Amino acid sequence: MTAVDVATGLEVSVVGPSTAAQHELERIAVRKLRYMLEKKEKEGQEPEKKTPPESSGGGIVV
């Protein structure tokens, strides 16, 4: 499961057993993303702000 902060482009991933419920992996990925954002803020590092290209030619925005 992967979670991405659209404002900064920060991406985190988690791996779990195939028997784990999808909503549990989603919850863990979101918590990890929040943790990483807070960690960067505490370290005084503001995550890079990335602006998406106007036309990337495909993909899905969630």
Image (tube, rainbow, N blue to C red):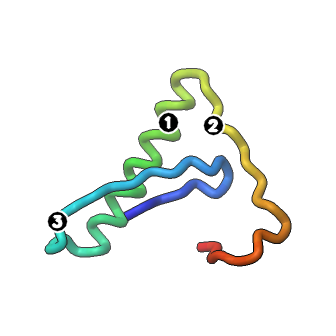
Is 58 above or below relative to 8?
A: below
What secondary structure is marked by label 1? helix
Under mark 2, the amino acid is: Pro
| Amino acid identity at mark 3 | Pro
In this rendering, would 22 be left or right of 3? left
Q: Residue at x 42, y 41 (%)?
A: 35
Nearest to viewer (mark 1 / mark 3): 3
- Whether residue 42 is situated above or below residue 1 in the rendered picture: above
Above-or-below relation of 24 to 8: below
Dot 2 or dot 3: first in sequence order is: 3
Labelled pair 1, 2 in contact (Cβ < 8 Å)? no
Q: Residue at x 63, y 37 (%)?
A: 47
x and y, in percent, of residue 16 in the image: 22, 61
Tell which tag, 1 or 2, sits nearer the viewer: 2
Name which residue type carries label 1: Glu
- Mark 1 or mark 2: whose residue is earlier in sequence: 1
Q: Residue at x 56, y 30 (%)?
A: 41
Q: CA distance from mark 1 to mark 2?
A: 10 Å
Q: Which residue is mark 3?
A: 17
Q: Is residue 13 above or below residue 24?
A: above
Q: For the residue carrying disc 2, how many other residues have a C-alpha within 10 Å: few (<14), some (14-19), or many (20+)?
A: some
Residue beneath disc 2: 47
Q: Which residue of the protein is positioned furthest toward the front in this rendering? A: 57
Q: Which residue position holds label 1?
A: 38
Q: CA distance from mark 2 to mark 3?
A: 30 Å
Q: How far is disc 1 from disc 3 in space, using C-alphas? A: 27 Å
Which of the 4 quarters of the picture holds residue 62? bottom right
Residue occupying image coordinates x 45% and y 49%: 33
How busy is the neighbourhood of tag 1: few (under 14 within 10 Å), some, or many (20 plus)? some
Say what secondary structure mark 2 lies in. Answer: loop
